[in-house]
Image (cartoon, helix red, strand yellow):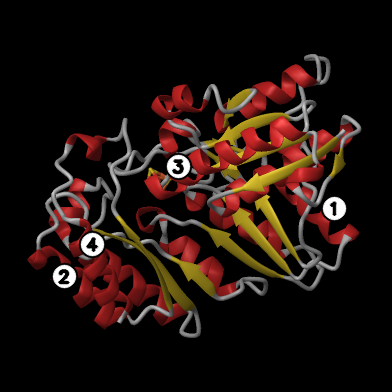
Amino acid sequence: MKYHIITFGCQMNKSDSERIATLLEKKGCQSALKEGEADLIVVNMCSVRQSAVDRIFGLGRKLSKLKTKNKKLKTVLTGCILKKDKKKFENKFDLILNAKDLENWVKKSKKKKTGCSYFKIKAKSQSDSIAFIPISNGCNNFCSYCVVPFTRGPLVCRNHKEIIKEIKQTLKEKNIKEIWLLGQNVNDYNCPKNPKINFSKLIKEIDKIPNDFKLFFLSPHPKNFSNELIKTLKNSPKFGKQINLPLQSGDNEILKKMNRNYTAEDYKKLVEKILENIPEVRLSTDIIVGFPVEKKKHFKNTKKVFKEIKFSQAYIAKYSPRQGTAAFEMKDDVSLTEKKQREKELNA
Ligand code: SF4
């Protein structure tokens, strides 16, 4: 059987797709380059923004057409799927598996004999020089706009020995130059087998691996960015000197409504500390414009932080309400025109 995986969204989804590919190949499936050549199409979706969900509806129609040409074709939808969307997708896909169900799916497909964990599946890497290594899954933070705690569930961390083993194995097989540690809140890491191993200690363990590679991570939360971590990064020979530190808003009232647990001042102090210790670091950020009740005066504060920090890059998203989140209960009162304008201003 030939399979084809279509991936949307973040690096975590890409990493999940690499593990799904391994699982399918273990079952004897072969990869098909094009959708039209496949008998099994897996769509790994993202629900972070409505536009990403809308693309799945469009894709569902395309897959239905492919099914009329290939009667054997089976389709699976997985990734971050909201409960309310699940119903709508039911008649478009043969099987729907939420990201947090993948672990159970693996266990079932192994007939419960091995007790295999999803994380233990070796990823079929898409790149010869970059490896994505998930160190945790899920999140306990409940930022008011975010669906991740609902679609991926609470934070679950991997055993640090398993992480180190996967990195060493990957380095042995390929000429990997970049290792990316992945987690929805990557610096909230704590080894379940040894609570003394936090994110900082994990980096120190990775530093001991002799191969020549650079280390990156996605995505850290400012509130978990400890002094210990800054010191570790400063002294790390592997650290790739690049940090994406999501700010989301530069206004304290909005940050509170977002449940981010830091103020703009905390964020700026943290950046100052990072730059003092690692002056050559490239800082990028994530921002949401047009969050409920974000008035011009609030947005002005975000612009102010942008002018002060001068990020090397920013990923700017226009707010879209996600059902089930706390922000969904707030009035989405910033017009699309205004959101676009704010996005343009920040980009400028
Ligand atoms: S930290 Fe906030 S934005 Fe990031 S995954 Fe967790 S809830 Fe979502």
Looking at the image, residue 248 lies above or below residue 152: below
Local secondary structure at mark 2 = helix
Instruction: Count residues near mark 1 (Cα–Cα under 10 Å), then give few for <14, some for 14-19, many for 20+.
Output: few
Disc number placed over residue 169 in the picture, else none: 1
Q: Which residue is drawn at the image coordinates 60% and 46% (left, top)?
A: 13
Q: Which mark is residue 197?
A: none
- Give the CA separation, mark 2 to mark 4: 15 Å
Instruction: Name the residue beneath numbered marker 4.
Output: 339
Looking at numbered disc 1 in the image, what kind of residue is underneath it? Gln
Q: Residue at x 80, y 14 (%)?
A: 111
| In this rendering, position of residue 323 left or right of residue 138 | left
In what element is the residue under mark 1? helix
Q: Which residue is mark 3?
A: 53
**Label 3: few (<14), some or many (≥20) within 10 Å?**
some
**How many numbered marks does the figure carry?**
4
- Mark 3 or mark 4, which has the lower sequence index? 3
Answer with the quarter of the image where residue 238 lies.
bottom right
User: Mark 4 belongs to which amino acid?
Assistant: Lys
Q: Is residue 312 left or right of residue 341?
A: right
In front of the other: label 3 or label 1? 3
Residue displayed at 24% across by 48% down: 258
User: Counting residues from the N terminus, which is met first, the one under dot 2 or under dot 4?
Assistant: 2
The residue where tag 2 is placed is: 301
Q: Helix, strand, or loop for circle 4?
A: helix
Question: Do labels 3 and 1 touch, CB within 8 Å?
Answer: no
Which is closer to the viewer, label 3 or label 2? 3
Image spot of residue 255 (x, y percent): 21, 54
Task: Judge whether residue 111 can be spotted in this image.
Answer: yes
